[in-house]
Image: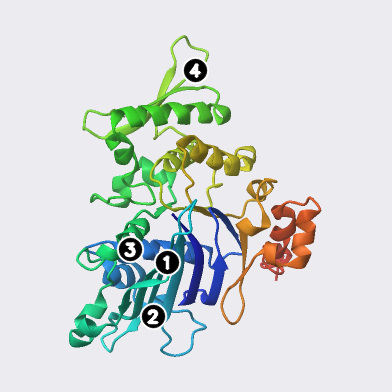
Amino acid sequence: MYISRLKVENWKNFKAAEVQLGHRLFLVGPNASGKSNFLDIFRFLRDVSISGGGLQQAVEGRRGGVGAIRCLAARKHSDVLIEVDLKEDGNDDLWQYRLSFSQNNNRQPVIQQERVEHNGEVKINRPDSDDKSDPLRRTETALEQTSANRDFRPVSRFFESVSYQHLLPQVIRDPQGFSPGKIGNDPFGRDFLQRVENTFSKTRDSRLKKILDAMKVAAPQLQELKVERDNFGVPHLVGLYTHWRLNPGKQNEAQFSDGTLRLFGLLWTLFEGDGPLLLEEPELSLHSEVVRHLPQLIERVHKHRKIKRQVIISTHSEAMLSDAGIGGEELLRLEPSAEGTLLKSPAQDPHDRRLLESGLTVAEVVLPKSAPKHSEQLAFSFSK
């Protein structure tokens, strides 16, 4: 299953936007155009589906309330709307989920509409009679209630499978330095090595072997990867490196370079889960020649796993977007405007489409348009 269509209104940077999606999407645009906020739409759908968290935690606990979510270009008291279509590969099965919400007089998130359809059949349409007799029900989505989502549980489970990963080498090296308490499924890596160690041993060893084969291209001296506990029971990622001495040298994540940790984290993430994967600037700390092959690498891992996992990537990398295999329909350019950020697809622009058909890459066609205006003046901004 994958998200084939997205429609949003009054969500952060986006006053109104609608776009068709495939299994792979690259997001480009200047800083503060909304790339992270676009990814956060899918994280939000995951958060509102989780029992014990749901709408209240997703809006207030994680995002600071409806006021912090609502687009600055929205008109007063406008509802926030998210609507998605979910498709199954190989058949015509279609789910549609629609959620709109605002806030009550106590600034508490409250549902204005929640609707689920399956192949045109309405499974739930709220508010219903139960919501009218008990208004408190409108503070929770049906997705987060196992007693209410029985007829559309595939939708809830799909949203729960969304994975956002932005692993930071500093966090992986010193997780307690960023948070003394345990944090599960942390996208920045506070529980990353624990997750690796907790993986079933045969599965973990198989993944490490495949990851090692790939990483040897970037780090030829790397000969072995494994996970070991220290004397305090803390798991570490250990690599053996060849050098001029007879025996290989041992290093753990504390000695790994940022690029090595970032590449390992990216590769492990590709093997972890099968729901939509959200990646934010995976090119950070990596050599441009490694970055150039990331789109193919992602495709090969998923082909090896025999899954078609939806991957959405934000990037500024010319090297990554120079891959000739990236089509115009696989890229969105975010363009800020006074009425919110606009989503532009080169596949829908006749001029861009002709350039792509002539053999130019999406990097050559789109990146010049996504550059900040007057960026050449940056170097002279302190000259006066």
Which of discs 3 and 4 lies nearer the camera? The answer is: 3
| Label 3: which secondary element | helix
Q: Residues within 10 Å of mark 3 (few under 14, many from 20)?
A: many
Which of discs 2 and 4 lies nearer the camera? The answer is: 2
Residue, far top: 246
| Label 1: which secondary element | loop
What separation in Å lies between label 3 and label 2 (alpha carbons)?
18 Å
Rendered position, 155 above or below 98: above
N-terminal of the two: label 4 or label 1?
Answer: 1
Q: Is residue 301 left or right of residue 349?
A: left
Residue at 73% over, 61% down: 368
Return the mark for residue 119.
1
Q: Residues within 10 Å of mark 1 (few under 14, many from 20)?
A: few
What separation in Å lies between label 1 and label 2 (alpha carbons)?
34 Å
Which of discs 1 and 2 lies nearer the camera? The answer is: 1
Give the quarter of the figure containing the N terminus. Answer: bottom left
Q: Nearer the viewer, residue 145 or 337?
A: 145
Query: Which amino acid type is marked by label 3?
Result: Asp
Q: Which residue is mark 4?
A: 242
Tag 3–tag 4 contact (CB < 8 Å): no
Residue 271 image offset from top left, x and y in percent: 42, 39
Residue 26 image offset from top left, x and y in percent: 58, 56
Rendered position, 151 above or below 134: above
Q: Which residue is mark 2?
A: 67
Q: Which residue is mark 3?
A: 47
Q: Quadrant of residue 224?
A: top left
Q: Nearer the viewer, residue 206 or 6?
A: 6
